[in-house]
Each structure stands twice: as structure tokens, then as C-alpha cells.
């Protein structure tokens, strides 16, 4: 029985993180004349790939290291790891399973979908006229903590999964994968980011 509890305690942080990623953070505890290093791997000896200013807000953490001490973030067109000791998470909003605002995009062809849950969405595709529509609040799948659906306009549906995603064009990391069935019946696939309110 003790082994079962030890295993549960080891896995527990991963279970909690499944509910909260991706999420926005602010840099904290860094001196005004210093920067927060972004590393190639989740350890202090890893190569520095970028840096964040001491007062940067709305840093999206899309993954955590197995020990829970490092967060995977984007800096420019690349991603890297920062010590979570220097990031303060935004307060959670119980009304939204995922951030209230999302920006989703994909390639082949280029498209984007900006969502403000419970209010509006805007779809824009290469060679298409931009369309503004209503957007419902995301609904969590029954029996799954990592899948959500959202009705867009009268008949569009976005299916969002909390999982690592690549846009295929940059070195950026995303914590949300999306399939968007537009009202004209065309299916678009891509990645999403949470954005500040």
C-alpha cells in the first residue's frame, strides 16, 4: 500500500499540471539590472538561448520539466526553459477551463482564429474574407480533462486539446492543439496560445 501512495505522490504534480497548462505568468524576483535566462534544456548549466527582461508580463508556460522546477516558454521565434522560481502565475478564472482568450493558427494554407470565450471569434484565411462570429464558452469533454469543444458562429466548431503542438514553421512551442471545422465545412488544423485579457 505504501508503494501505491509513493507512486501517486510522484505522479500527482503531473495530474495537477494537466489542468493548468498552458497558463500565463509574470517574471518576478529578477533585479531591474538583470534578466531571466532562457535555456536550451531545463537546467542552469544548459546553453542560454534567449532572455526575458526583469519585468516581462504574460509569459505563456506551455510545459513543465518532470521535476516541476522549469517551464517551457517562447521567446521570439524560439522556445526554451526558464526557472519557475522566477515566474508568478496569473490568478485562475474559474469560469474558463482554458484562458479566456486564445489565438489559434495553422499553415497550408495560412489561417488564424482569435477567440474570446463567451463573446466573439474572428477567422481569417489566406485568400478568404475575414469573418467575425459569436463564440461560446469552451466545454470540457466528459471523461477527459485535456479536451474541449467550442461552438463558433452558427455551425463552426473548434476542438481543442491540451497537448504539445508545433506550427511546422518556427521553433515556437505551443501547449494547445486545435482542429477547427469552419462553417463552410473546411477543416483547419493548427496550434493555439492563451493571451492576456
Image (cartoon, helix red, strand yellow):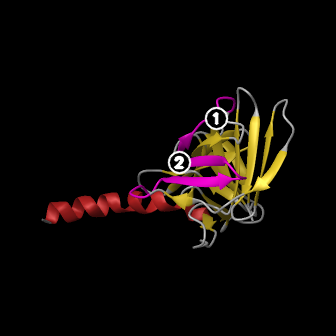
Task: Answer whether residue 102 is magenta in the image.
Answer: no
> What residue did someone put label 1 on?
187
Q: Is residue 116 visible?
A: yes
Return the x and y of residue 145 as percentages of the image width and height.
44, 57
Q: Earlier in the sequence, mark 1 or mark 2?
A: 2
Q: Are marks 1 and 2 in contact (CB under 8 Å)?
A: no
Question: For the residue carrying disc 2, how many other residues have a C-alpha within 10 Å: few (<14), some (14-19), or many (20+)?
Answer: many
Cα distance between the residues tagged 1 and 2: 16 Å
> What residue did someone put label 2 on?
161
Specify whether 95 is left or right of 30: left
Task: Answer whether residue 164 is magenta in the image.
Answer: yes
Q: Nearer the viewer, mark 1 or mark 2?
A: 1
Taking the view exactly as shown, the residue that stands out farthest to the left is: 1
For the residue pair 195 and 156, the one nearer the viewer reads as 156
Whether residue 68 is situated above or below residue 76 in the rendered picture: below
For the residue pair 117 and 65, the one nearer the viewer reads as 117
Picture quadrant where residue 101 is located: bottom right
Return the x and y of residue 111 as percentages of the image width and height.
75, 36
- Where are the magenta residues, as a range? 142-170
Return the x and y of residue 147 as percentages of the image width and height.
49, 52
Which residue is rendered at x = 53% and y = 54% of the image? 148
Question: For the residue carrying disc 1, how many other residues have a C-alpha within 10 Å: few (<14), some (14-19), or many (20+)?
Answer: few
Q: Is residue 44 visible?
A: no
For the residue pair 150 and 46, the one nearer the viewer reads as 150
For the residue pair 64 and 107, the one nearer the viewer reads as 107
Which residue is rendered at x = 12% and y = 65% of the image? 1
Picture quadrant where residue 173 is located: top right
Amino acid at each position: 500500500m505504501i508503494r501505491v501512495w509513493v507512486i501517486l505522490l510522484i505522479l500527482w504534480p503531473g495530474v495537477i499540471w494537466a489542468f493548468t497548462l498552458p497558463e500565463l505568468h509574470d517574471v518576478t524576483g529578477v533585479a531591474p539590472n538583470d534578466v531571466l535566462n532562457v535555456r536550451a534544456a531545463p537546467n542552469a548549466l544548459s546553453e542560454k538561448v534567449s532572455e526575458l527582461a526583469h519585468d516581462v508580463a504574460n509569459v505563456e508556460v506551455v510545459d513543465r520539466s518532470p521535476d516541476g522546477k522549469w517551464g517551457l516558454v517562447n521567446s521570439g521565434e524560439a522556445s526554451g526553459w526558464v526557472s519557475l522560481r522566477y515566474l508568478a502565475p496569473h490568478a485562475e478564472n474559474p469560469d474558463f477551463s482554458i484562458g479566456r482568450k486564445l489565438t489559434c493558427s495553422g499553415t497550408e494554407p495560412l489561417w488564424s482564429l482569435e477567440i474570446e470565450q463567451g463573446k466573439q471569434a474572428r477567422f481569417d484565411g489566406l485568400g478568404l474574407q475575414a469573418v467575425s462570429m459569436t463564440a461560446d464558452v469552451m466545454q470540457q469533454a466528459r471523461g477527459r480533462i485535456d479536451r474541449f469543444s467550442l461552438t463558433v458562429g452558427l455551425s463552426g466548431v473548434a476542438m481543442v486539446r491540451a497537448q504539445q503542438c508545433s506550427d511546422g514553421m518556427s521553433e515556437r512551442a505551443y501547449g494547445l492543439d486545435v482542429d477547427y471545422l469552419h462553417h463552410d465545412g473546411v477543416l483547419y488544423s493548427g496550434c493555439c496560445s492563451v493571451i492576456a485579457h
